[in-house]
Amino acid sequence: MEIKLDPRTKIFMIFVVSAIVMMSVTTPFLWGLKIVTTMVPIALLIAEKRYASALRFFALYISALILTFYFLSSESTGLIRALLTGYCGIIAQFLPAFITAWYVIHSTKIDEFMAAMQKMHVPDGITISLAVVMRFFPTIKEEYGSIRDAMKMRGISLAGGNAAKMVEYRMIPLLFSCVNIGDELSAAAITRGLGGNVKRTSVVELKLHVFDWVLILLFSIATVIFVLNKYILL
Amino acid sequence: MDKKKLTAKDFITVGIFTAIVFVVEFACGILGFIHPYIVASYVVMIPIVGSIPMMLFYSKVDKFGMITIMSVLIAIIMFVTGMGFLGAPLIIIAGVVADLIAKTGDYKQFKMISISYAVFCLWICANYFPVIVTANSYRESLTEEGFSAEYTDSLFRAINSKTIWVLLILCLIFGYIGSYIGKIVVKKHFEKAGIV
């Protein structure tokens, strides 16, 4: 099944999920809702044929939830249990936002994203910078991987236990390659007419389809329920 | 073209450095899971480690708006990663003020850049806002979401409405110190290589 979502729907999803993770969950019903909203991006990942990452996120989220609910409570003491509670809490709280962001970054092409932002009349400066940020996280990861490999080969990964050196050895090469990539990116952007004075046109035609509306509706309802629970019923 | 107008190249520079600064923040943030006191020490770690990319960034800034845009981006990313929107005003105000301060030095005087960076570092304190502003409900939600009582207690001992002022001031001080460290590192590596 091929589902092509409009970037605007995805942005809306990000906002809703990020707002929901901040709200405290008090009743089983709300927990259920939270879990359902988390399952949506996972399902979308499956639709994108990213089975491995979908499975990984699913397993991580479910195990964090199970651990939180059945094995740990706020009274658990001892270092390992305390750490474990902390980790599971953090995973259960932040993973939904992380999955959604991951899905959006990996499934949105930059030109689609730019077109969507333009349609929403976001200032060019924010759009371009944000697009670069989105594109850049995977690049940083890749570059960092190569730097680590290079350090391993030379046997200086730990820099003799000197923390300042450890930071320096990683940061400097990373900055070097990022600056260079940035220059290339600027050149590429200018050939695509970014920063010109005319309104850019886009090859991608953006349109909200039925599925977009279904998701928007679903997430809006979830938001309303959470807000009602937080500010009115309590 | 008007010299004061931001070009696509500037926006891309902002994007790149925002990504790097955020990676630094994220790396330090992970350490915070170990113990809450480390969460409080963000105000020391992030200004100093982050100073290296930021000083390189400052060397590329020459127009008003770049630092402001960076702060807006950080606010957006913080929201998306689940830190809430309470800190957003602080982040953006810090960004605008930092931008104005650096502008008085024409983005070249190092004295002004130092102060500007120190002010910019205040955005780190936005991390603590959910802890302070919504102290009671946040505490509840932390315990419910499975943080151990120990963790929560120490977190609130380290960060509350009294210590936030200390943390803010520490942010300023270490931002100022960090700017010197960053400058040394940038000089050592990048100026010699001719990137700056």
Image: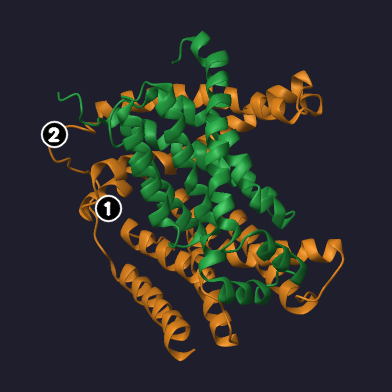
- The span from disc 1 to disc 2 (Cα, nearest Å) is 19 Å
Q: How crowded is mark 1: few (under 14 residues within 10 Å), some or many (20 or more)?
A: many
Whether residue B60 is visible here, answered yes or no, is yes
**Vertical placement of residue B184 versus B30, above or below:** above
Name the amino acid type tagged 1: Ala
Residue A116 is tagged as 1
Q: Which of A44 and A167 is in front in this view?
A: A167
Rendering colour mode: by chain
Task: Give the mark, 1 or 2, whose residue is nearer the N terminus.
Answer: 1
Q: In this view, does A116 lie to the left or right of B166?
A: left
The type of residue carrying mark 2 is: Asn
Q: Colour of chain B?
A: green
Tag on residue A197? 2
Chain represented in orange? A
As drawn, A87 above or below B14: below
| Chain letter of the residue beneath label 1 in the structure image | A
Q: Please tell me which residue is depicted at 24% across the width and 60% down the height of the picture.
A: A207
